[in-house]
Structure formats: structure tokens, C-alpha cells
Image: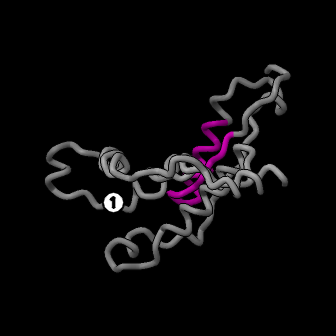
Amino acid sequence: MSGGKRKTLGILGGMGPEATAYFFELVIRLTAADEDQDHVPVVIRSDPRVPHRTKAILEGGPSPLPSLIEGARALAFLRGRTYVLPEDVTDLVADVFRHRLVLSYQALADAMTADQIIQKVMQHVQAPDKPLESHVRAGAKS
């Protein structure tokens, strides 16, 4: 691999620790590496404290929002920032909500996927024009 600066791959779990481990195993297997040092730098976040998805949907259980916020903070850190930008949140929306959706019979008949529904919803969510100036200045100082 080249000696230049390599980006760190962030793996944010959400389907259980076995699925996260399996995904990481695939990353290792599919990376063309002759030595350990040739692999992509990886940070994995797998948090079993995320509320049970089905209970959240069907029984009005705890909101997934805190998990989304923590994931956005982790992603911002992986991207070299101490502050979260709107794209950090939108980049995680599908991963956080995909498995929390229960598709209607109509959506299934129309061959809609959870990702397509999330994408349609997100088209109607207005992101802030820019990050708060105070957050950018605070992030630059640390």
C-alpha cells in the first residue's frame, strides 16, 4: 500500500455483534494485503445498549435518537472532527432506522425497500445551512 495518509474505515454496528464481526471479517478477507500493516485502519462501534428495535416500534419503547447522536459523534471523530455536521447524521440515518421500519403490505407489493422509504423521508428533512460557528471554532481549538 502507499505510504500516504489512509482514511480510517468506521464500522457502526446495528444488527448485532455477530453481524458486525462478520462484516469486519469480510473487510479483512477482501483487502489486498500482504502484511498486517497493509490493511485499512478500522474502528468498530458496536453498542448493545441500543434499544430493542421491535419494542421501540411496536410497544413505543425507547427512541433510537440517542444512538443516532452517539453514532454521528463517532463518525465525526473518525472523520477527524470534534463536532458533528449534518452529513454525519444523514450518513447514519438509513443504518439506524432501516431495521426499525415495518413495511406495509402496499410497500411490499410495490417492491419498496426500507432504504427507499428512508430516502423519500429524508428528502423532506431540511438540513441546517452550515454548522454552528461556535462548534467549528471549539473543534478547531481541540
Q: Which residue is drawn at 64% across and 44% down?
A: 24
Q: Where is residue 72 in the image (x, y as percent from the top left)?
A: 60, 55
Colour scheme employed for the rendering of this structure: one colour
Badge 1 element = loop
Residue to which mark 1 is pinned: 101
Looking at the rendering, the stretch of residues picked out in magenta corresponds to 9-27
Who is closer to the viewer here, 82 or 109? 82
Q: Quadrant of residue 46?
A: bottom right
Q: Position of residue 4 (x, y in %)?
A: 82, 23
In the rendered view, would you say 82 is above or below 56?
above
> Is 4 displayed left or right of 54 in the figure?
right
Who is closer to the viewer here, 4 or 53? 4
In the rendered view, would you say 53 is above or below 11?
below
Q: Where is residue 101 in the image (x, y as percent from the top left)?
A: 33, 60
Who is closer to the viewer here, 126 or 13? 126
- Specify whether residue 12 is painted magenta: yes
Q: Residue at x 36, y 79 (%)?
A: 60
> Is 37 displayed left or right of 122 in the figure?
right
Mark 1 neighbour density, 10 Å: few (under 14) some (14–19) many (20 or more):
some
- Specify whether residue 75 is painted magenta: no
